[in-house]
């Protein structure tokens, strides 16, 4: 069970609350941006939950080996917006990052929904990628338990370079997660050859990880950053699991990208007797469930986790999402 905080999300107040609530709900890992302020806030939230008896989760930070939808920010000049614009960009933003002043960069996590919503095409996507020299010292300072590398089909060389930078930090990582899906394949292949190509590339990455003495975890990114859109988004990740699972290299398979409260039902309905899923990662849907309470706490000028009339309600919602997966894990272990 992993909480995805967002690879380019720098909303430290919300991340502190999310880390606290979902740690108390029982997640095993929290994945956030490789940013000192973000990691510090996440650790504060975890510490709050530990004071109430929670089990400490792994802290994971995300990197990319190139341009990636998880590592971008929206931007537009609000002075170019028509005076009477109905602001569809603001309505579709799940992070409440858009208002009359433009995009609040710290809240934007790059979902991209505002881009097609703008009737005048004024919104740009700006990539956010760490330089090679910055990676080793940053990781040493952050000292995460695990690292996730986002990659794409055709970027094996870039992956090897980024992996060497991670190894240069010389950290005792619990896992090196590799996040990849089929959405990046533009070759025009039919589904079967595309999956076979993805499997072949994951085997190449597996060889690189083993060479560095790292334990892999394969995150199957079905439909990135869309789990809060609707139940139908769960199909992409589960479909990828069924197709890729028999071809994947050794290591646990984790569902991500479009995962929501329908995902477990879909797994149990369609994956019986087939490939086994080791876990799930929730991002947008995890935030959406507690977003109204985050907003109320912000309006009151306090952390959600410091408001005893609010945080138990947030915890109940979080447990509703992660509880079924935790019970499934406990049953499998038993």
Image (cartoon, rainbow, N blue to C red):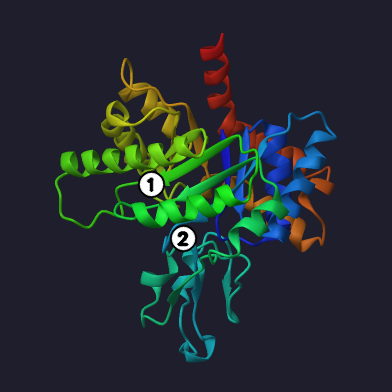
Q: Which mark is residue 66?
A: none
Within 10 Å of disc 1 (Cα), the crowding (few <14, some 14-19, many 20+) is many
Which quadrant of the figure has residue 249? Answer: top left
Query: Quadrant of residue 245 in the image?
Result: top left
Q: Secondary structure at mark 1?
A: strand
Outermost residue, top side: 334
| Residue 142 located left or right of residue 278 | right
Position of residue 174 relative to residue 80, above or below, is above
Measuring from the top left, give residue 68's x and y in whole percent: 42, 60
Instruction: Return the x and y of residue 177 as percentages of the image width and height.
Output: 50, 41
Front residue (pair 30, 14) = 30
Residue at 61% across / 38% down in the picture? 173
| Residue pictured at 40% horizontal, 71% vertical | 115
Helix, strand or loop at mark 2: loop
**Toward the viewer: 265 or 153?**
153
Q: Residue at x 37, y 29 (%)?
A: 266
In space, the residues marked 1 and 2 are separated at their CA atoms by: 16 Å
Residue assigned mark 1: 180
Residue receiving disc 2: 111
State which tag comes first along the sequence, 1 or 2.
2
Q: Is residue 254 above or below residue 295?
A: above
Horizontal and vertical percent for residue 275? 34, 22
**Nearer the observer, 119 or 21:** 21
Point out the image quarter for the N terminus: top right
For this view, does 95 lie left or right of residue 14? left
């Amino acid at each position: 069970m992993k909480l995805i905080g967002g690879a380019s999300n720098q909303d430290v107040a919300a991340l502190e609350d999310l880390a606290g609530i979902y740690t108390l709900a029982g997640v095993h890992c929290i994945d956030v941006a490789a940013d000192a302020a973000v990691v510090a806030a996440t650790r504060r939230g975890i510490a709050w939950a530990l004071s109430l008896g929670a089990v400490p989760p792994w802290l994971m930070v995300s990197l990319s080996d190139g341009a990636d939808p998880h590592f971008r920010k929206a931007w537009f000049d609000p002075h170019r917006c028509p005076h009477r614009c109905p602001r569809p960009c603001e309505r579709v933003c799940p992070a409440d990052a858009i208002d009359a002043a433009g995009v609040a960069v710290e809240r934007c996590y790059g979902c991209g929904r505002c881009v097609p919503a703008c009737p005048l095409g004024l919104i740009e996507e700006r990539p956010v990628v760490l330089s090679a020299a910055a990676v080793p010292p940053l990781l040493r300072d952050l000292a995460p338990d695990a690292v996730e590398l986002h990659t794409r089909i055709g970027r094996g060389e870039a992956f090897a370079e980024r992996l060497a930078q991670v190894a240069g930090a010389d950290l005792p990582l619990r896992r090196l997660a590799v996040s990849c899906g089929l959405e990046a394949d533009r070759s025009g292949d039919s589904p079967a050859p595309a999956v076979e190509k993805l499997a072949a590339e994951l085997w190449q990455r597996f060889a690189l990880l083993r060479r560095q003495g790292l334990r892999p975890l394969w995150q199957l990114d079905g439909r990135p950053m869309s789990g809060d859109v609707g139940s139908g988004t769960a199909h992409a990740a589960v479909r990828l699991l069924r197709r890729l699972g028999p071809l994947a290299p050794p290591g646990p398979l984790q569902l991500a990208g479009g995962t929501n409260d329908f995902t477990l039902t879909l797994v149990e309905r369609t994956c019986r007797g087939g490939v086994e899923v080791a876990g799930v990662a929730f991002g947008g849907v995890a935030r959406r469930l507690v977003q109204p309470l985050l907003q109320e706490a912000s309006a009151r000028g306090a952390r959600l986790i410091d408001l005893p009339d609010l945080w138990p309600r947030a915890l109940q919602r979080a447990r509703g999402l992660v509880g079924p997966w935790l019970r499934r894990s406990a049953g499998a272990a038993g």
